[in-house]
Amino acid sequence: MRPSSSAWALSTLAHCPLLATAFSAISRGRVGLIRPLPASPFLRRALYYEHPGRRLCSRLRSSNDSDDNNNNNNKNNNKNNNEEESNPYFDPNFPDLEFIDYSDPSYQVDQGSSDEFVRNPSATEEETLAEIEAMRESRRRRNDEYQFETYHASVLREGEIALGEWTVFQTDTFMGPDVVAGRDERVKHVPRLLKWDKELKVVSRGYKVIVDPEAEWRVDGKRIVHEETLATANDFPIYIHRDVEEDVLGWEEEDRRHVQNTFWPKELESLDFRGPGGNMCVGKAYTICDAVPLQTNSQAEQHRREGPFSEMRTELGLTDAGMRFRIKLDYATLENQEESSVPPPLHLRTLTVCRETLDGYWPNPSDNYNHEGGNDMTTSSESTARRKNQDQIDTALFGPPGAPGGLYDPPPVGSEERAIQNYMLLDFEGGATVLLPHRLDQHHENGGENSYTDSFGWVTSLDWTPGKIRYQVDRKVLGGTKLKGLKTLELSEVRGEDADRWRPRDGGANMRQ
């Protein structure tokens, strides 16, 4: 058997409190705060699958305006006073402004999904509805473009490579009934995680390709292609000037198959960044997803965005300080359940922790030896340069396991029974904590009766502190057969040293829009 060691992976969720939302950010960045933020280092952002938003007031009247007016002559004073009365915010779009009042519990950001619309009295009802939908679709397209370009520029860094060390954990769920029968009776519903016997060294990158230079909408003619390959001898300084065999790193066929698994569409397009596609980025966090529809004798081929699915692969990651920490979750159905009349659940097959650096050197300094005299990249010499933040990298990627105090902001997952039977809470080296569902039920429809999963869907959380700022990103998806579709991608940011002070205290709640 490939794995060499194992560990029980069971935890129940302690319902930890949640701090009220301090800040919500619309994807296109067109946010003006009419009301100042509280004096707190805690910042929370949320993205939803529709982000049309109105143009918000971005300038407030200065307290010095009156002093400046006193220096003008009477004529200018009268003119300015008249302008002040007609446009007190000095905004060219006044009075067509939306004021954000975070103290109003009933306030919601306009996402273009309501029926509020100033109707043209001469238009028919069909024409009005068509105009409303055209307006909403235009907003969606602009957000699609923003997400597409932001993912390429911020996450993929416009095609630059990332060098990573991958740790692979394999569940015992797919190892046969005899292995599963060996679980402890007290936790028989929870899979055991078995760690592979070696780390994988992987080179990753993503870049744009042009498929239609004449596309009417600019990004419609572009796609993003991802590449992830096992490292070769030429990727390590110690081997560059040596005559070594091609398989010096000892990669096996199983290693190659694992790295070849894709967690994104073959060609990622802008429309894939809408909620049903499961792809999105916010701040320094992102998520991507791909799935394979479940095919049965009575079921025609389905769109890949809606289940039930036979396989689903999800990735969740954070990037900061020249490092990237991401987790890859590979789910699949059991073979003996695929012919059931009820959509079978998806079970976690593998969990991969990817620790990466973005400066052209490997995360682990032992992989950065210079070919001249065996010098280490972390040792000063004429032929090598010391990586200034190597100590920070060592701590952020390979330091003690687990986020301080556990998950900073545990999200709601439903009943205690559901938390125990479907979720795992795991600590990883580098001060990271991950909450994830190891079993995804697909037989509950949204809004169905007696369905405790419908109101919550599913959530995956990653808590990581690469430097002064502590991050937690929550990927929240729908329930039932639409479990690939994003409800929200939420990012919390707090100074690491202040995390305990600002830790949420209200028992766990979803972010208010």
Image: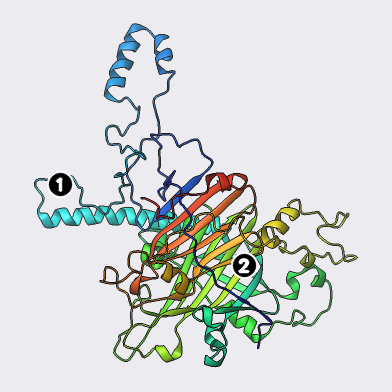
Asked if residue 214 shows in the view, the reply is no
Q: Position of residue 396 (x, y in %)?
A: 67, 57
Residue at the front extreme of this rendering:
186
Residue 210 lies left or right of residue 319; in this view the side is left
Residue at the top extreme of this rendering:
74
Q: Position of residue 195 (x, y in %)?
A: 65, 77
- Give the alpha-carbon distance from disc 2 to disc 1, as whole Å: 52 Å
Q: Which residue is at 55% across, 70% downward? A: 328
389 and 141: which one is in front? 389
User: Which quadrant is home to the N terminus?
Assistant: bottom right
Question: Mark 1 highlights which residue?
Answer: 119
What amino acid type should be assigned to the residue bearing mark 2? Cys
Q: Which residue is at 61% across, 48% downward? A: 496
Categorize mark 2 by other alpha carbons within 10 Å: few (<14), some (14-19), many (20+).
many
Q: Which residue is at 40% across, 31% downward? A: 59
Q: How is the image coloured?
A: rainbow
What amino acid type should be assigned to the residue bearing mark 1? Arg
Question: Mark 2 highlights which residue?
Answer: 354
From this view, report whether residue 133 is shown above or below residue 87: below
33 and 107: which one is in front? 107
Number of the front mark, 2 or 1:
2
Residue 342 lies left or right of residue 229; in this view the side is left
Mark sitting earlier along the chain (2/1): 1
